[in-house]
Image (cartoon, helix red, strand yellow):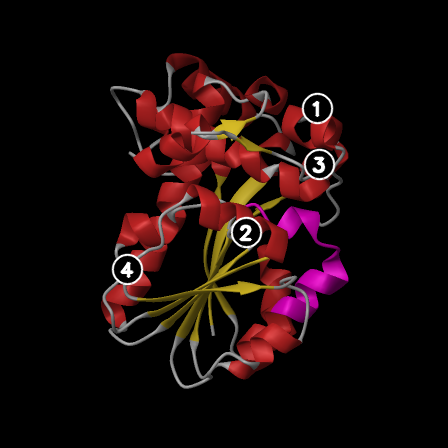
């Protein structure tokens, strides 16, 4: 079988680092996420994954972040048997495969058309009420076409930092205004993380740029009436850090004790 050559660049190319992290984690005897579909996809891609700079410790961190977002998504769906999932900037992530939502859940994977074309070639389609929407997540038309009849959870992993603040704000306002209730689940960098972006090989080698840093998660509560921050987990406090390799545990212990660095990354959950 011919392997897929990658022509994506910039922010779109960085999704390969996330995919590779999950693939490496799946190969570990102590896998956190057990995302074997990610590993199958990596093996079908013609790409020098060394460019991502992702190795064992980084891969475990990627898996922990994804698992936390999975757990929150699953918790939301457990409380809402009929819901809509907006999986924004889905890239090559297999969240729908990992969670196996019931057929009563409407699942929408949203990303650029060229990303979804690659996705279709590399990943099997999930079962159930699933479809893909080829569009920029910051565009208007795609969201206007989504039925607004159900509680909705919007999940976006590895997206917020690539947006400009005004675009992120507008996206959040449009989602919270359109649906009757729901949650927003996403990860973010603080402004220090944005300033240090060139130290991240996946960003630097893809020629991507990071823009939006969030230092005060409570600020976002003011963007929509009733929007409430339920959780703001620092990366250094994330559940499961004891599952990291020793080097990762030591690194997190050090970062947690340096002012500024302890807030370099978070995973956020909001209710509206």
Q: CA distance from mark 4 to mark 1?
A: 39 Å
Q: Quadrant of the N terminus?
A: top left
**Placement of 109 over or under 258, stated as above or below:** below
Magenta residues? 158-171
**Placement of 241 over or under 171, stated as above or below:** above
**Mark 1, residue position:** 199
- Crowd band around label 3 with a 10 angstrom C-alpha radius: few (<14), some (14–19), many (20+): some
- Crowd band around label 1 with a 10 angstrom C-alpha radius: few (<14), some (14–19), many (20+): few
Residue drawn where x is 51% and y is 78% of the image: 226
Q: Earlier in the sequence, mark 2 or mark 3?
A: 2
Q: Earlier in the sequence, mark 3 or mark 1?
A: 3
Comparing marks 4 and 1, which lies closer to the viewer?
4
- Crowd band around label 4 with a 10 angstrom C-alpha radius: few (<14), some (14–19), many (20+): some
Which numbered disc covers residue 117?
2
Q: Earlier in the sequence, mark 2 or mark 4?
A: 2
222 drawn magenta: no
């Amino acid at each position: 079988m011919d392997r897929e050559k990658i022509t994506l660049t910039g922010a779109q190319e960085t999704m390969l680092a996330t995919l590779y992290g999950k693939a490496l984690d799946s190969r570990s005897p102590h896998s956190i996420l057990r995302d074997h579909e990610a590993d199958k996809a990596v093996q079908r891609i013609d790409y020098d994954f060394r460019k991502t700079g992702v190795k064992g410790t980084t891969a475990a961190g990627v898996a922990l972040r994804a698992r936390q977002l999975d757990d929150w998504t699953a918790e939301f769906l457990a409380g809402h048997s009929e819901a809509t999932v907006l999986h924004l900037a889905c890239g090559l992530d297999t969240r729908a495969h990992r969670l196996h939502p019931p057929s009563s859940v409407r699942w929408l994977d949203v990303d650029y058309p060229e990303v979804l074309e690659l996705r279709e070639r590399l990943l099997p389609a999930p079962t159930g009420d699933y479809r893909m929407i080829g569009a920029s997540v910051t565009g208007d038309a795609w969201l206007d076409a989504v039925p607004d009849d159900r509680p909705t959870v919007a999940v976006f992993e590895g997206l917020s930092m690539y947006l400009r603040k005004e675009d992120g704000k507008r996206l959040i306002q449009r989602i919270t205004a359109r649906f009757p209730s729901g949650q927003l689940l996403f990860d973010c960098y603080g402004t220090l993380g944005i300033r240090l972006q060139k130290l991240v090989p996946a960003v630097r080698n893809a020629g991507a740029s990071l823009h939006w840093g969030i230092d005060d998660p409570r600020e976002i509560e003011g963007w929509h009436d009733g929007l409430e921050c339920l959780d703001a987990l620092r990366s250094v406090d994330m559940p499961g850090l004891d599952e990291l390799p020793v080097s990762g545990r030591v690194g997190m212990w050090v970062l947690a004790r340096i002012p500024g660095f302890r807030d370099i990354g978070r995973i956020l959950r909001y209710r509206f």
